[in-house]
Image (cartoon, rainbow, N blue to C red):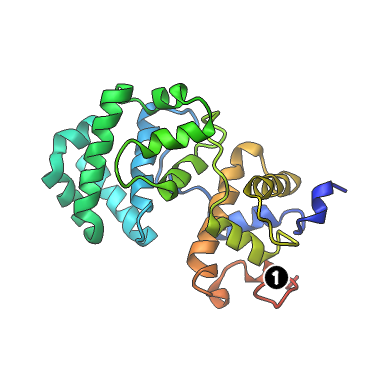
Amino acid sequence: MSISKQYRSGEDGDATRIVAAVGGRFSRELGIDLDESRSDAVFQWLLASVLFGARISESIVKHTFRAFEEAGVLTPEEIERTGWDGLVSILDRGGYVRYDFKTATKLLELCRTLRERYSGDLSRLHAEASDSRDLEERLKALAKGIGSVTVNIFLREMRGIWQKARPLPSDLILLAAGNIGFFLQKIEDREQALALLQELWKEGGGRATDFPDFESALLRIGKNYCRKKGCGACPVRSLCRAASGGASNR
């Protein structure tokens, strides 16, 4: 038995069943292929991460990203060329009305900084970062308003693609993992929590390269159900200790 069994629970296969129930990576859902780390795909995912970073529904984010696709505005050059008024128009078409002005400003600053400091290439930003924490700070420095939430969203799905992408689990991921019962006790150390979740994923037959699917699935559960106390509608209720008063409904 692994030492970590003292701290975590869950049967083999629970992690993969959760991904099957609620979905995995958001980038794949948007049709963004990050596997080969192409600069265009990585930038598209950063654009989507900026959109996801606001307190707004997933459906609006997806509609807005599609609006950028339809307008052919998916590169730093095209964003700068489109300008503030054009970006606001695209954001409004996607339903991103509440944050349209500030997001247009943020995207223009992001692209300008990326061009001036890294020749418009996020791979260069990654290469110049000294470690994972420096990488996070460099991403935040691209524009005012890019905070920890956006950076965590972005780097979570870059894990295993960028060597220095090592984000710690977010509050919502920890909330879902704790409610489901993956942790036998409250875990304060996020590094330890990450290691336990990675081990659980591996022992359930998941590939290391697909671990971001598990993280994203937990995020979906934490955001859409746990935070809203929506146990009754949760698609993984049968696996959840919190929903069943302490014992999973197996």
Q: Which residue is at a point 67% across and 68% down the rendered structure image?
A: 240
> Which residue corresponds to the image point at 51% horizontal and 35% vertical from the top-left?
133
Percent coordinates x, y for residue 237 in the rendering? 63, 71
What kind of residue is marked 1?
A: Arg
Count of numbered tags: 1
Q: Pointer 1: what residue?
A: 241
Front residue of this view, candidates 3 and 41:
3
Q: Secondary structure at mark 1?
A: loop
Name the spot of residue 122 as percent of width and height, x first. Answer: 38, 28
Q: Residue 151's image quarter?
A: top left
Name which residue lies at 70% across and 57% down.
Answer: 14
Which corner quadrant holds the C terminus?
bottom right
Taking 174 as reference, is 115 above or below it? above
Extreme-right residue of the structure: 1
Q: Residue at x 23, y 31 (%)?
A: 112
Neighbour tally class for label 1: few under 14, some 14-19, many 20 plus, Cα within 10 Å: some
Q: Is residue 74 visible?
A: no
